[in-house]
Image (cartoon, grey):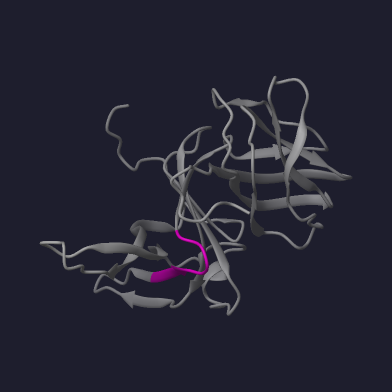
């Protein structure tokens, strides 16, 4: 794959599409603490991996429109926020998800009167998780299934998925991530919490353990109209320090 720029990226926070407000992704960081464990038979320091951490920091333009920058960041919630950065917006584009605490909302006004805000989100129980988009931002007009995505083979170390539910016109959809070994017979892998119209935008992260089959798709159930959402997922790997539960 060729080198890429950051053109045509996207960012979602709590189900809000802030791509038109965020001017820069200042930090997308996944890191681990180290534990020094020197031993008498080593000529240099020996270190073990410690706890993981993550951070996503952005700079945005002030925008008090409905479900936009000011509505997303100004409450400084004490509860967790969910951030999803997408390096591209097509299926299989790399994406970084983080369950975080938002710790600031710092504004600055330049001499030319531009008003920008800096927001730092620090990991809360999970590090930054780099995965891929299951599909481009989608709208299900009613209960239906998306086209399948072929990941070439199955995996055996579980999966984590992030749902950013942007809008619902009416009703209460339940969004599911399903998997299949043959692209024909499907079973539920992750079922996100049903959301009623009026309770969006919202976001949720869930995980599942064990085998994840080769093919993946999104299925929506329930009585609703026009549910708009985006889903990112990460297949677990054998080298993960903590397996998906």
Where the C terminus falls, by quadrant? bottom right
* Residue ranking furthest to the front: 41
Tell me residue 75's x, y (percent): 57, 77
- Picture residue at 44% right of the left edge, 76% below the top: 105
Residue 1 shows in the view: yes
- Picture residue at 41% right of the left edge, 70% below the top: 119
Left or right: 57 with respect to 185?
A: left
Q: On the image, which quarter does residue 34 sit in?
A: bottom left
**Of 231 and 125, which appears nearest the observer?**
125
Where the N terminus falls, by quadrant? top left
Magenta: predominant secondary structure element? strand
**Of 208 and 48, which appears nearest the observer?**
48
- Picture residue at 78% right of the left edge, 62% below the top: 198
For residue 59, above or below residue 233? below
Residue 64 shows in the view: no
Tell me residue 83's x, y (percent): 51, 59
Chain part drawn in magenta: 118-127
For residue 129, above or below residue 101? above
Q: Is residue 244 magenta?
A: no
**Of 104 and 98, which appears nearest the observer?**
98
- Picture residue at 58% right of the left edge, 80% below the top: 78
**Of 94 and 199, which appears nearest the observer?**
94
* Residue ranking furthest to the right: 223
Tell me residue 112's x, y (percent): 26, 70
For residue 235, above or below residue 167? above
Q: On the image, which quarter does residue 180 sit in?
A: top right
Q: On the image, which quarter does residue 64 sit in?
A: bottom right
* Residue ranking furthest to the left: 43
Tell me residue 11's x, y (percent): 48, 52
Left or right: 72 with respect to 145?
A: left
Count of numbered tags: 0
């Amino acid at each position: 794959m060729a080198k890429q720029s950051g053109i045509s990226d996207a960012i979602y926070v709590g189900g809000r599409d802030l791509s038109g407000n965020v001017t820069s992704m200042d930090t997308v960081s996944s890191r681990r603490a180290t534990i020094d464990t020197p031993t008498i038979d080593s000529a240099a320091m020996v270190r073990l991996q410690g706890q993981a951490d993550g951070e996503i920091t952005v700079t945005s333009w002030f925008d008090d429109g409905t479900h936009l920058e000011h509505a997303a960041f100004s409450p400084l919630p004490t509860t967790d926020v969910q951030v999803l950065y997408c390096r591209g917006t097509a299926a299989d584009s790399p994406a970084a998800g983080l369950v975080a605490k938002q710790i600031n909302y710092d504004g600055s006004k330049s001499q030319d009167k531009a008003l920008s805000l800096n927001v730092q989100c620090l990991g809360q129980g999970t590090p930054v998780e780099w995965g891929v988009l299951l599909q481009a931002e989608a709208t299900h007009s009613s209960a239906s299934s998306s086209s399948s995505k072929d990941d070439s083979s199955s995996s055996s170390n579980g999966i984590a998925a992030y749902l950013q539910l942007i809008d619902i016109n009416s009703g209460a959809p339940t969004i599911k991530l399903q998997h299949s070994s043959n692209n024909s017979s499907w079973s539920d892998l992750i079922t996100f919490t049903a959301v009623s119209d009026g309770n969006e935008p919202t976001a949720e992260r869930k995980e599942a353990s064990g085998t994840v089959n080769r093919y993946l798709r999104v299925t929506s159930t329930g009585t609703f109209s026009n549910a708009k959402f985006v889903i990112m997922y990460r297949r677990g790997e054998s080298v993960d320090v903590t397996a998906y539960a």
